[in-house]
């Protein structure tokens, strides 16, 4: 199997959920021995296999393999001649129980895909999810094969003082030939995607945790020498996560060690391998001078996410990859709840919904729309999507809302009691929730199978004489690729009614014995549902979708009512969201005026709204102060007008900056005395609001504000404030901008994570020459097409720069597609995940559509395209 990965010279095949069949053989134990070498690593794998009673008794044993050199295979000690297939080996006549021994040879240094065993910075790392284990040895690489692993690592003592794998370690033995070895034993059965090996010259930061039942756990974070002083936050986050999972879900850690290794070449964020999480350095390393508040929060969340997988994913895993959201949706829900408990729940929810709308709603509206449980794929790595992760988390959240938190906890307990050490399905999870709550979730499950974001519209009327209030909720989901017909979903609408003074009214639905105070949940289950409220003393304003109780698009409330809710609602999410909707409609009116060839003014009500936020709680105010982003506005237009959106938003920001200059400056000054850097919610909120004010001050066009931003940059208090100032300056054509960019580069050129920020900030600049700047940065000595973080920093950030990516010349698209084309031969997974911005072509004008499609076609025309990129580009063009 000489190819580096599966390429499309062999016709790509679709894998379908409907074709699921149990494996012919199970593997009870796996005994691996690695003799590590960068150019030649020998892997000996001893498998005790047994025929699966759940499979037909004449099926042959299939072992997956990719980019491997097979050295030898024996069965019960006798040589066998396997049949080599396109994707592995088939061995016939394997007895009902047998020991297979398979020897393969690898070249980790040549592995540029970062899937399987690879080398980064002279050290060895593995990544096996979803299908990397087959790039290490021949094996039934599917999650329903769960085995107990023993892993022996033999390596050069000097090159690899550290040798890690899953489970608990044995003693290190000196082999007397300059090499040493260690054996790790993992007592928990696991699928091979959770296998991990890390070895090299690494240093560690250590700590410990005692579980509530008294197990002592040694904790360690392994990093490259020099990075030891950036691990404290990650370690704290780990300990907090371990305690939280015990308190909230009763889940304890189950090994004597928990290790984390950080690597700078990594395809995604992190990986939950049993007892040995491997992390992108971006989600481990932080010091106040190098990492922003957003980085700190990202670390806390991702550390928690991977730790929580120990139960939701590892102890109970997926039967097949169509069940991916079983572990990912649930674990995202768990990490969201964890993070909400660490700071402001409302601000966390606002951030999560922002992310959901930007990534998942857009995915749902485009050519790559798919259900939370997809039914077919070509390359499973393309399905680690916002839909599977974030909409999957929303589906879990809705279940918790519908059955109630206590029943949800009972459902979790039942799920673990039933399925510990099993590979199960989404249906199994929902069944546990149903059995624990007594609530029939059959109709609710449609959320897993139906793609698309429902449009929910409301109408209401008030009968003053009868004191009756009628609320009508209608829903419709537009067709998505392959799903022309949509059915109604079970939508939980958390709501309340406010009187004219913004006081919460107790509510009583017709037929209910007593009125209920505060927020209640209505279930909309049909195309149209009517809810009749009785004893409503005065005409109410409905507050709907509190805390964003369902992933839907809501419409139907008048601008006046939205303004009222933005000012008065008791639910902070609705307050924020209503304010954003009001701002969006003001901006879209400006866009329409531009399109008619006229110059719009800026609605002074916007100044009032922004001004009234300045005295509010800073973290919330910072969220509410920011105008909806250009992409958010684009999502609300049938044909996106990137230039009009950019100009309208810019002009509104300038007008706000000018109208509120003194108050913004006073707020900025009031928040300036922050003391030493602290990473709690209140401190983050203050920095965030202060930088929001700075951004408006500079937008006003005042030269003194530019000097203020430069002074904040020069003061260099912490990376949050430095980067905020740099970001603001990078959008202004002024000498300070060039000085700051040059100084930043000089200060941080040897620090990869900080240098990523330097690349990203330039790619995000709204200045007209950004396409040329990005082109030049691609040729910069520090740009590295091998490193996914660097590619994401420069090229993916650029795709998020709406006005410059969509440059009418097509130069932005070309540069973007060129990068995908250059990257695909060495890292198809990362290349494929970059395709989607081009797939948004339907939303633009005819000229841009043609240019975007042309680039997609150029990608598709390549010979030897990876299966991953083929899937993304062909679906995007369809
Ligand atoms: N489970 C991994 C993602 C693996 C991605 C494979 N292409 C990280 C996570 O979700 O925790
Ligand atoms: Zn995950």
Image (tube, grey):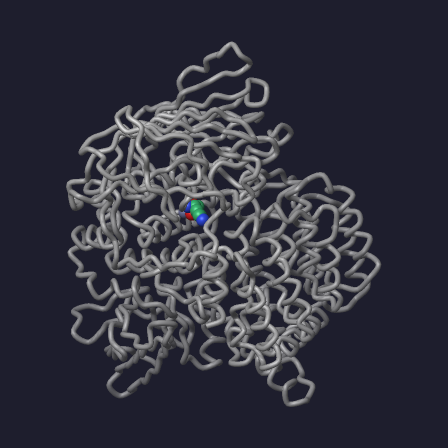
Whole-percent x, y for residue 567 in the image = 49, 70
Q: Nearer the viewer, residue 790 or 107?
A: 107
Q: Is residue 594 above or below residue 296?
A: below
Q: Residue at x 45, y 67 (%)?
A: 875
Q: Which quadrant holds residue 457?
A: bottom left
Identify the residue at image location x=71%, y=59%.
Answer: 774
Q: Of residues 187 and 40, which is closer to you in this image? A: 40
In this rendering, would 587 be left or right of 187? Answer: right
Judge whether residue 489 can be spotted in this image: yes
In the image, taking residue 452 as reference, residue 229 lies left or right, namely right
Would you identify the image quadrant in which residue 816 lies? bottom right
x, y percent for residue 646: 65, 73
Report x, y in % for residue 744: 75, 47
Camera-nearest residue between 492 and 198: 198
- Residue drawn at 41 percent across, 39 percent down: 133
Residue drawn at the location 49% of the way across and 75% of the way down: 563
Q: Position of residue 378 (x, y in %)?
A: 40, 58
Number of numbered discs overlaid on the protein picture: 0
């Amino acid at each position: 199997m000489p190819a580096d990965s599966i390429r499309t010279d062999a016709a790509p095949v679709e894998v379908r959920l409907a074709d699921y069949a149990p494996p012919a053989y199970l593997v009870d134990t796996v005994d691996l021995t690695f003799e590590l070498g960068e150019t030649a690593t020998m892997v000996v794998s001893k498998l005790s296999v047994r025929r699966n009673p759940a499979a037909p008794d004449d099926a042959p044993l299939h072992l997956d393999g990719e980019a491997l050199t097979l050295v030898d295979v024996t069965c019960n000690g006798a040589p066998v001649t396997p049949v080599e297939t396109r994707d592995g080996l088939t061995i016939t006549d394997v007895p009902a129980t047998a020991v297979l021994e398979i020897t393969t040879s690898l070249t980790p240094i040549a592995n540029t895909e970062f899937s399987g065993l690879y080398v980064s910075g002279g050290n060895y790392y593995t990544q096996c999810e979803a299908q990397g284990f087959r790039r290490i040895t021949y094996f039934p690489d599917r999650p329903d094969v769960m085995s107990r692993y023993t892993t022996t690592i033999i390596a050069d003592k000097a090159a690899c003082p550290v040798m890690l794998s899953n489970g608990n370690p044995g003693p290190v033995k000196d082999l007397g030939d300059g090499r040493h070895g260690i054996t790790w034993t993992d007592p928990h059965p696991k699928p091979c995607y959770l296998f991990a090996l890390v070895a090299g010259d690494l240093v560690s930061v250590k700590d410990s945790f005692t579980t509530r039942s008294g197990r002592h756990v040694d904790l360690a974070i392994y990093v490259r020498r020099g990075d030891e002083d950036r691990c404290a936050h990650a370690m704290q986050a780990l300990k907090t996560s371990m305690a939280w999972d015990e308190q909230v879900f009763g889940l304890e850690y189950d090994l004597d060690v928990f290790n984390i290794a950080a690597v700078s070449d990594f395809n995604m964020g992190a990986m939950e391998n049993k007892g040995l999480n491997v992390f992108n350095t971006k989600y481990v390393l932080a010091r106040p001078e190098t990492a922003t508040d957003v980085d700190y929060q990202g670390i806390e969340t991702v550390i928690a996410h991977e730790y929580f997988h120990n139960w939701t994913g590892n102890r109970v895993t997926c039967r097949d990859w169509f069940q991916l959201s079983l572990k990912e949706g649930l674990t995202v829900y768990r990490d969201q709840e964890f993070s909400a408990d660490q700071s402001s729940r409302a601000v966390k929810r606002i951030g999560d919904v922002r992310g959901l709308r930007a990534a998942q709603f857009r995915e749902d509206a485009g050519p790559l729309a798919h259900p939370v449980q997809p039914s077919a794929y070509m390359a499973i790595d393309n399905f680690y999507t916002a839909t599977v992760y974030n909409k999957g988390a929303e589906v879990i959240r809705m279940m918790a809302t519908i059955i109630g938190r206590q029943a949800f906890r009972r459902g979790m307990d039942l799920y673990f009691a039933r399925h510990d050490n099993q590979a199960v399905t989404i249906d199994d999870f929902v069944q546990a929730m149903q059995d624990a709550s007594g609530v029939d979730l059959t109709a609710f499950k449609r959320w897993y199978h139906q793609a698309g974001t429902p449009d929910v519209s409301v109408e209401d009327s008030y009968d003053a004489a009868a004191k009756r209030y009628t609320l009508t909720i209608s829903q419709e989901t537009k067709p998505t690729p392959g799903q022309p017909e949509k059915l109604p979903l079970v939508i939980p609408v958390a709501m309340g009614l406010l009187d004219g003074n913004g006081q919460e009214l107790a509510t009583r639905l017709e037929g209910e014995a007593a009125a209920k105070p505060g927020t209640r949940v209505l279930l909309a289950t049909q195309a149209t549902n009517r809810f009749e409220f009785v004893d409503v003393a005065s005409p109410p304003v409905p507050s709907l979708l509190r805390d964003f109780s369902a992933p839907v698009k809501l419409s139907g409330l008048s601008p006046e009512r939205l303004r009222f809710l933005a000012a008065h609602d008791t639910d902070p999410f609705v307050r924020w969201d209503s304010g954003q909707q009001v701002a969006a409609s003001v901006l879209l009116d400006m866009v329409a005026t531009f399109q008619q060839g006229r110059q719009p003014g800026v609605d002074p009500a916007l100044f009032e709204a922004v001004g009234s936020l300045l005295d509010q709680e800073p973290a919330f105010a910072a969220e509410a102060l920011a105008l909806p982003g250009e992409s958010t506005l684009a999502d609300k237009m049938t044909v996106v007008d990137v230039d009009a959106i950019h100009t309208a938003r810019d002009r509104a920001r300038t007008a706000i900056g000018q109208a509120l200059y003194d108050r913004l400056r006073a707020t900025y000054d009031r928040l300036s005395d922050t003391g030493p850097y602290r990473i709690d919610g209140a401190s983050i909120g203050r920095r965030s609001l202060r930088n929001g004010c700075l951004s408006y001050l500079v937008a006003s066009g005042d030269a003194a504000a530019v000097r203020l931003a430069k002074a904040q940059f020069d003061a260099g208090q912490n990376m949050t404030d430095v980067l905020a100032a740099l970001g603001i300056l990078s959008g202004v054509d002024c000498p300070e901008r060039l000085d700051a960019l040059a100084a930043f580069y000089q200060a941080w050129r040897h620090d990869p994570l900080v240098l990523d920020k330097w690349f990203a900030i330039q790619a995000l600049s709204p200045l007209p020459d950004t396409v040329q700047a990005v082109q030049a940065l691609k040729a910069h000595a520090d740009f590295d097409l091998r490193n996914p973080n660097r590619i994401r920093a420069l090229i993916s950030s650029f795709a998020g720069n709406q006005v410059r990516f969509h440059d009418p010349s097509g130069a932005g698209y070309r540069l973007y597609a060129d990068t995908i084309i250059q990257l695909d031969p060495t890292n198809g997974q990362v290349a494929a995940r970059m395709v989607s911005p081009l797939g948004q072509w339907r939303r633009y004008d005819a000229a841009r559509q043609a240019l975007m499609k042309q680039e997609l076609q150029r990608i598709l025309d390549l010979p030897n395209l990876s299966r991953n990129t083929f899937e993304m580009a062909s679906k995007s063009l369809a």
